[in-house]
Amino acid sequence: MLTPDILNALKGYTANMSNSVTLVVQTGEHEKRAELLSFLNDFASVSESISVEERDTMGKLRSPVSFMLEVDGNPNGIIFSGIPGGHEFNSLVLAVLQSSGTPLKLDSGIQNIIKGVATELKFEVFVSLSCHNCPDVVQALNQFAVLNENISTETIDGGLYKDLIEERNIQGVPTVFLNGEVFANGKIDTAQLLEKLMDKYPSITENMTAEAEKLPLQDVTVIGGGPAGISAAIYSARKGLNVTVVADRVGGQVKDTMGIENLISVPKTTGPELTNALLTHLNDYEVTLKEHLRVDRIEDGDTKKIYLSSGEVIETKTVILATGAKWRELGIPGEKENIGNGVAYCPHCDGPFFKGRDVAVVGGGNSGIEAALDLAGIVKSVTVLEFLPQLKADKVLVDQAEKRDNIQILRNVASREVMAANGKVQGLEYMDRETEEVKVLDVDGIFVQIGLLPNSQFVKGLVELSAYGEIIVNEKCETNVEGIFACGDVTTVPYKQIVISMGEGSKAALTAFEYLLKK
């Protein structure tokens, strides 16, 4: 199943394994078992430190197509139920390497939090092998298991366990269960997982700062890891400044974009590819990266104090805010209650769950029409609902959508309520804004694509915001607070584009450098 090129790459990755890892497969019969064993034996063939063993695990594994990782003969809490191909292949590779001693890609502050968990936590992550958001959750929880013997995590391929998907009313991925109860669903990053854990188990925050390393006074602290933030950090580092980047994840919203064809000089790329390129470029410079952390608040003064979700405090001379934006929600009854049960924000991840069924896309901009076109090849029908009398999407996209027999477009309509029964979406209530007639659209899924909301809540009351929540800046990226600058999609700068954000990030860095020179 694994090509010679992949096997050669794996040989390089596993060459320096310091601990032996055994892939223990549950005994029994299953139509996919032979395929799983072939896959794992090919995988193990690249290193003497990796082996495959068939064993009755006495109930520790779910089925004959489940396997767990043992390190030097001891289970480490990582389980895969299914064949981890597709996007989850990297999750398996990282799990083996990190179990064997490869350093974890988690900030020391986060590691201290996880090591301090004294409660037994059993995670189950339901995934689709075509979901590009699922690996982020799987890989984060696998690292948690490596760090703490009280934590275990099982990655479950929904395509192989359809009865379990039906039993638990799962209609979106990733869906995470903790100790048998729904813990999180939909796109979620490591920072959000940590926040949910700290909310559920407040006691783990007691050890947050016990072993945290104190950073020296920074010249520039960039908050945000998208195109604007990485650009600001690189330009600052090139000026010889001490720079720290705080980000919930590198790439930001860009990481969720599958097709990028308007980044000048790069004819075609994807969000994950661009994110990797941003990180590679950043690593060329001496920049401290504190990823998977959020900023709780900023204290102004000649020296700014930045309070992190890990309990750490960064002292800095200047701050560059580059926190971007997030998907805007409809804010109607039934939306939040049915996220993962028919309400979704990522057609790439959750579209396959609605194969052969009727769905709605709310939003007639580029994102909405692109989502409709993507879904049209999978589902039975797509109905696009646009609030305004005219679509906002580019004409070329609208023309493509109107040519599709299974795409219907409703203009000048207002979504009012998500209708659900027995834990599943059954329809969307909407109103014709011209006649005020209320109707119900019978659909099994609703994909919300209505734009972005600035991530500026944590600086409300610190810097001046527009009526839309954007940080108000001048032509030099200066806010109304001395020493605090802002750039990218979180600001009032028009046209939320990658190339514009990169330019604004570099501009903010140059302005901060000029400010420091004058100080």
Image (cartoon, rainbow, N blue to C red):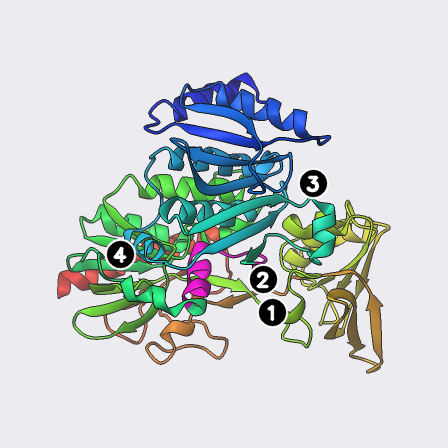
Q: Which one is earlier in the sequence, the residue at label 1 or at label 3?
A: 3
User: For the point 71% across and 58% down, which residue is it?
Assistant: 169
Q: CA distance from mark 4 to mark 1?
A: 35 Å
Q: Which residue is mark 3?
A: 160
Q: Residue at x 34, y 40 (%)?
A: 281
- Which span is picked out in magenta? 180-198
Kindly indicate whether the residue at mark 4 contacts the one at mark 2 (C-beta within 8 angstroms). no
For marks 3 and 4 on the same chain, the one whose residue lies earlier in the sequence: 3
Instruction: Give neighbour class at mark 4: few <14, some 14-19, many 20+ (Cα, 10 Å).
Output: some
- Picture disc at residue 510: 4
- Describe the element under mark 1 as helix, strand or loop: loop
Residue type at numbered disc 3: Leu
For badge 2, the amino acid type reads Glu
Q: Position of residue 447 (x, y in %)?
A: 69, 60
| Above or below, 187 relative to 3 | below
* Front position among marks 3 and 2: 2
Separation of disc 2 and disc 4 at Cα? 49 Å
Asked if labels 3 and 1 touch by Cβ distance under 8 angstroms, the answer is: no
Reading the image, the residue beneath label 2 is 181
- The answer to whether 421 is drawn above or below residue 90 in the figure is below
Give amino acid for label 4. Answer: Leu
Nearer to us in this view, 161 or 482: 161
Query: In the orientation shown, which residue stands out farthest toward the bottom?
Result: 436
Residue at 47% across, 48% down: 152
Residue 183 in percent (x, y) is at 55, 61
Distance (Cα) linking label 3 and label 2 = 21 Å
Residue behind mark 1: 329
In the rendered image, is residue 284 in sight? yes
